[in-house]
Amino acid sequence: MGPLPTPAEAEALVRERVRALPVESRPLASLAGAVLAQSVRAERDQPPFDRVTMDGIAFASPSWREGLRRFRVTGVQAAGRPPLSLDTPDACLEVMTGAVLPAGCDCVVPIELVSMQDGWAEVDGSAAVEPFLNVHTRGLDCREGDMLLARGTRLGPPELAVLASAGLPRANVPAAPRIMLVSTGDELVEPGEPIEGWQVRRSNSYALRGALALRGFSRVAEDHLPDDPDILRDRLAVHLDTHDVLVLTGGVSMGRYDHVPRALRELGIDEVFHRVAQRPGKPMWFGVSREGQPVFGLPGNPVSALVCLVRYVVPGLLASIGARTAPVEATPLGAPFKVRPPLAFFLPVQLERSPALERVAMPKPTRGSGDFISLLGTDGFVELPPGPADYPAGHLATFYRW
């Protein structure tokens, strides 16, 4: 057996082996949080016309430079109406925010600096008047045909506005992955059910489902399977027929009742790696079915399961929908920390502000991979290189959010 993969190597293997999900066309109103599977170009110049940015009056600035301060009002240019024209140099048009700048006008003075009476508009002499004042000029933001959104862009509020401005009622996005979360173990009891002193609550699936939901993955189903190899194999076969991704927790280590690796092999799933040079979460398992579905076997301890989901399952899901890789969040430690094992170390942290107003990651170590209570108040974890080593305050580490 060769050396165990590092976390970076394990993540790279996951990204290489996940399959791209099929693309579907969906209406604009349903796209929040989705990832574009197409590029988007500007339908036309933006703004598509010289756009008035304040309620007021519009006129020709040369008249102002010639000393004119009182203008005859010849009409009202409302938003959404065809452009009017200036009749004479001593005239003006009342204009509304969002309206097209009338022909012959090149500036706008806010209504607060104008006195309107008997069809005349007198401008305060202190007003600043210059060409295209208070006008958002045509094409200033982008030109027709400009690239606005690239394939792989996550669609948030600004991106949805851009899609609408490009005239697209629908867009192509990858189908949302159908994820099956499988908890294994005879000791697990559902919240609300009677429990014996030697049993524990089934909590992992709720934490993992929450982490997936916060990242926009909502098509998640759950199952709880006993430590029975035959039941485990048969139920997993059913889930492989109906889901794009399987995420299991528990049963992946080396104990007598850790049946998951064998059951997955019997189902023809190709093991890519089993165990990673890390703590917590060393027993992490990953494989791919004959049909290309990724299968993740996370350790059963709660801290290990959550760390491995964030570190490997989430990158795999993002790769399957073609999302662009997010930039690394490098965060300095707020206090020194000693890593003892010769393994990459995932350290829970709480983000704080230092006296210099710099964001720092304050170490909040747990009492072990089963101590999920100690995660309360933490924001995520940082990855530290293998020990034994002492890492000082200020050491830059990659930060991962829960």
Image (cartoon, grey):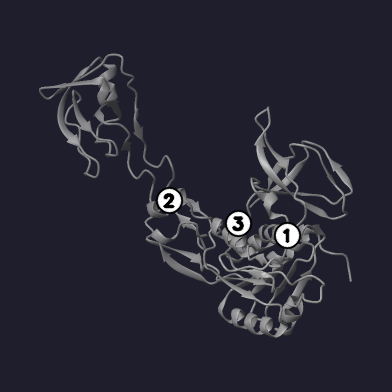
At a point 58% along the width and 82% down the height, the residue shown is 241
Q: Earlier in the sequence, mark 3 or mark 1?
A: 1
Image location (x, y in percent) of residue 342: 88, 54
Mark 2 residue type: Val
Q: Which residue is mark 2?
A: 162
Numbered circle sitting on residue 277: none
Provide the secondary structure element on which disc 2 rests: helix
Q: Nearer the viewer, residue 289 or 58?
A: 289
Q: Rounded to the nearest whole Å, what is the CA distance between mark 3 and mark 2?
A: 18 Å
User: Which element type, helix, strand or loop, lies under badge 1?
Assistant: helix
Left or right relative to 35: residue 372: right
Disc with the residue nearer the chain's start (2 vs 1):
2
Which residue has dot 1 on it?
Answer: 304
Task: Give the residue pinned by disc 3.
Answer: 324
**Based on the displayed image, in which of its 4 quarters is residue 72 positioned?**
top left
Mark 1, other Cα within 10 Å: few <14 / some 14–19 / many ≥20: many
Within 10 Å of the Cα at label 3, are there few (<14), some (14-19), or many (20+) other Cα atoms? some
